[in-house]
């Protein structure tokens, strides 16, 4: 019988996608450069030239049967070794190849991780605002998403709210730092407190509680900030990584899950991840791309361009009189709706050909998300429209 | 809590993989050319040179942001159009781009299709012998696999057995022609009868019954045989395709699902597939590979090599006195165990450095599967070992 729950998930595509499609239609009517699309998180900076060269070289020099053949389900051993070495050097985790499971990107990392540590009927805590697909992925394993709002003053974790939401059914939590949609970064202090809190809960309930750390924006931190990594603080952490943003390869679907080597059930957890990947239909991560990322650990696209965009748009938006959170990472700016209604804000912005995503879809009212992974030119060209939008609220300074 | 069902699926990897790993170890001990590995279905023929050239050209000429960017969830529209046109020309299906959903290979095609048409508590019929991962994929959507043995004389469908296995809970059936592990091809007569049978069941139960046609070996048919396509006979068919075998790209994970345009709930079904893909964590199929297959419809690897292998190994095996089904397609030979025990046959073969897979893992006792997607040289070199194995059973003619 047709699975109507899936039909609904297929028909109600995300608000972000809808805005993006609306933008495409609008561009066809009024012109490509007259619509300012800040809706989608599609990297605008190309992948590094080294990545293209590496692919070309592999195609030229490798035996195609080996290059395009099945790897083991967890991925090519040399690639996993290269990732473990890089992560150990950078974050001192003490990981081995056996802790790394290559995936087809962040979404796969998350569905596989969730299916491994959350069973039907259990609960997974997400911190609002959050990437809306988390809910879809949590429901895929029969679990329920429990929303915990972050502290409004600094977008760190509100531990009182977290404690209140915690229950005997809580199997896991998802953190995402740097954050989509706010650009906020969890501090070392927050992560230390979270680790203490979770260890206390592990003791209280006599079982493991998993922290799923969704880290696609790990390299996108600004002002020379050193990112605090959840796995450095809490043992039972699964790192979900993707090269989509750091190498501008979102369509290629390549990433990994790393089991924290300090996890209490390290080996069992890894085996479980293998079982979940198998069940969901992931045979192995794309083989050519595995080689490419394995040979280019530490390489990133031109992140300075995003940092420049951030400065530009943050000044522009706040100069208009809007209130925004100064993002420490990722490529999103979270802006307060002057009317208090994010949907109204997004709708009104459309009249000025500005496409910005209402925060309701991220589980928090009253904001919009501006993706600034666009060209500098687009940001500059949108200044007049943002000014006019601000004026319509009587905001203009 | 750790999902122990997944742990088990991660720890009990398939017998095929185990044999393959055993072979690798054995080769390290006695030498690469002294072990005759017929265990795994990894294409030995390289992808066509046109595929490598096409990838290189795309990397050289395309804007990397577009080439490696997200496509729409269902895939790039031009690629889907190219596939629809090709399928219409070849099989007269009347498909449109809107019927095609690009996937990360056959396993993804199957898990997404199953989640779309089989709900928790329902049943999916599989014909034994069958690819063992079907069971894992069926269980992933909470449904149960119901095994129906094929007719032993010709490996076509046994309709009496099928009717007996059919129940009010039957949501779908999986067919796989050409077949893994037998190499058998379902005839037009069988498919016509199956379509009539299923239409009758649809009428009887007043709802749709889905036929999931797993077609990764579609191009691998021999003796100039024209393949009868299930979708040409039965309306409510989902075609699950992969380029793994036809283009020798198994590690790259690229394929598609096509909704039969004649399906009663054509549009609803497509939307449901989009929802399932989203839920399972497939954001889009790998973008570079989408372009590659879109531009190379109808191209295949050197299939003649497999046809030559088939002749060679079939003669060799039967000349030794073994009984085997002459395969019409795929690259597998299904051989009767002289003792009646496939496991014993496989174990004994190991002593002669022959790696062949017992049929028990395919849900049928008493046979072994020989994968002949290997080099001609390996087949020729294995002749002595097969002869000795036959002699050990007193079979040698």
Image (cartoon, coloured by chain):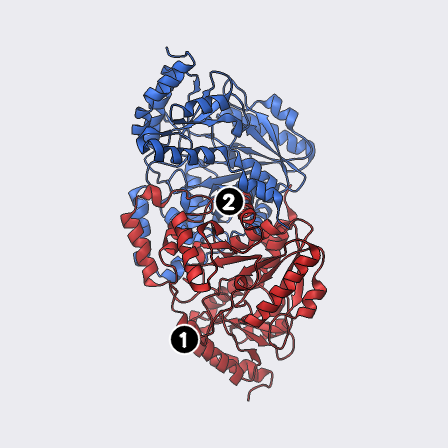
Chain colours: A blue, B red
Residue mark closest to the camera, 2 vs 1: 2
In the image, residue B376 lies at what x, y percent?
Answer: 41, 75
Chain identifier of the residue bearing label 2 in the image: A
Residue B377 numbered tag: 1
Image: A201 above or below A75: above
In the image, residue A367 lies at what x, y percent?
Answer: 49, 22
Q: Nearer the viewer, residue A185 or A33?
A: A33
Q: Nearer the viewer, residue A392 or B122?
A: A392
Identify the residue at horizontal 33%, vertical 36% (top origin).
A45
In the image, residue B208 lies at what x, y percent?
Answer: 63, 54
Image: B30 above or below B73: below
SS at badge 1: helix
Q: Please identify the residue farthest to the left as the structure is shown.
A: B61
Read off the residue under disc 2.
Answer: A108
Callout 1: few (<14), some (14-19), or many (20+) C-alpha neighbours within 10 Å? few
Callout 2: few (<14), some (14-19), or many (20+) C-alpha neighbours within 10 Å? many
Residue B176 numbered tag: none
Image: A36 above or below B27: above
Q: Nearer the viewer, residue A366 or B134?
A: A366
On whether disc 2 and disc 1 are found on a single subunit, the reply is: no
- Residue A236 seen anywhere in this rendered image of the structure: no
Chain identifier of the residue bearing label 1 in the image: B
Q: Please identify the residue farthest to the bottom as the structure is shown.
A: B397
Marks 2 and 1 close (CB-CB < 8 Å): no
State the CA–CA distance, disc 2 to disc 1: 40 Å
Residue B110 image-quadrant placement: bottom right
Q: Which quarter of the rendered picture does the C terminus of chain A lie within? A: top left
- Residue B75 seen anywhere in this rendered image of the structure: yes
Q: Nearer the viewer, residue A62 or B57?
A: B57
């Amino acid at each position: 019988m047709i699975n109507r729950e899936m039909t609904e998930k297929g028909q109600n595509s995300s608000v972000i996608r809808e805005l993006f499609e609306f933008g495409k239609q609008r561009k066809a009517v009024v012109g490509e450069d007259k619509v300012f699309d800040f809706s989608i998180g599609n990297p605008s900076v190309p992948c590094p030239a080294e990545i293209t060269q590496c692919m070309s070289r592999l195609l030229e020099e490798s035996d195609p049967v080996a290059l395009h053949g099945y790897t083991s389900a967890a991925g090519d051993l040399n690639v996993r070794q290269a990732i473990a070495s890089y992560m150990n050097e950078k974050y001192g985790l003490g990981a081995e190849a056996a802790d790394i499971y290559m995936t087809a990107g962040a979404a796969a990392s998350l569905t596989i991780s969730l299916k491994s540590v959350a069973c039907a009927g259990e609960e997974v805590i997400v911190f609002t605002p959050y990437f809306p697909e988390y809910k879809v992925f949590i429901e895929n394993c029969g679990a329920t998403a429990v929303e915990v709002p972050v502290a409004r003053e600094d977008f760190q974790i509100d531990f009182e709210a977290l404690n209140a939401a915690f229950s005997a059914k809580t199997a896991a939590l998802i953190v995402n730092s740097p954050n989509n949609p706010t650009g906020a970064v969890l501090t070392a202090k927050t992560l230390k407190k979270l680790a203490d809190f979770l260890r206390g809960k592990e003791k209280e309930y006599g079982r493991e509680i998993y922290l799923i750390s969704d880290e696609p924006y790990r390299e996108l931190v600004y002002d020379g900030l050193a990112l605090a990594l959840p796995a450095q603080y809490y043992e039972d952490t699964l790192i979900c990584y993707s090269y989509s943003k750091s190498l501008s390869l979102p369509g290629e679907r390549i990433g990994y899950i790393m089991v924290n080597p300090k996890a209490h059930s390290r080996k069992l957890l890894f085996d479980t991840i293998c079982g979940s990947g198998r069940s969901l239909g992931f045979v192995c991560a794309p083989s050519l791309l595995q080689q490419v990322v394995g040979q280019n650990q530490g390489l990133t696209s031109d992140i300075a361009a995003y940092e420049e965009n951030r400065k530009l748009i943050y000044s522009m938006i706040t100069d208009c009189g809007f209130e925004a959170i100064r993002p420490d990472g990722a490529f999103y700016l979270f802006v307060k709706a002057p009317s208090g209604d994010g949907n109204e804000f997004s709708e009104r912005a459309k009249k000025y050909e500005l496409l910005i995503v209402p925060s309701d879809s991220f589980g928090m009212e009253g904001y919009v998300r501006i993706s600034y992974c666009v060209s500098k030119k687009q940001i500059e060209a949108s200044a007049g429209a943002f000014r006019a939008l601000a004026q319509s609220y009587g905001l203009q300074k």
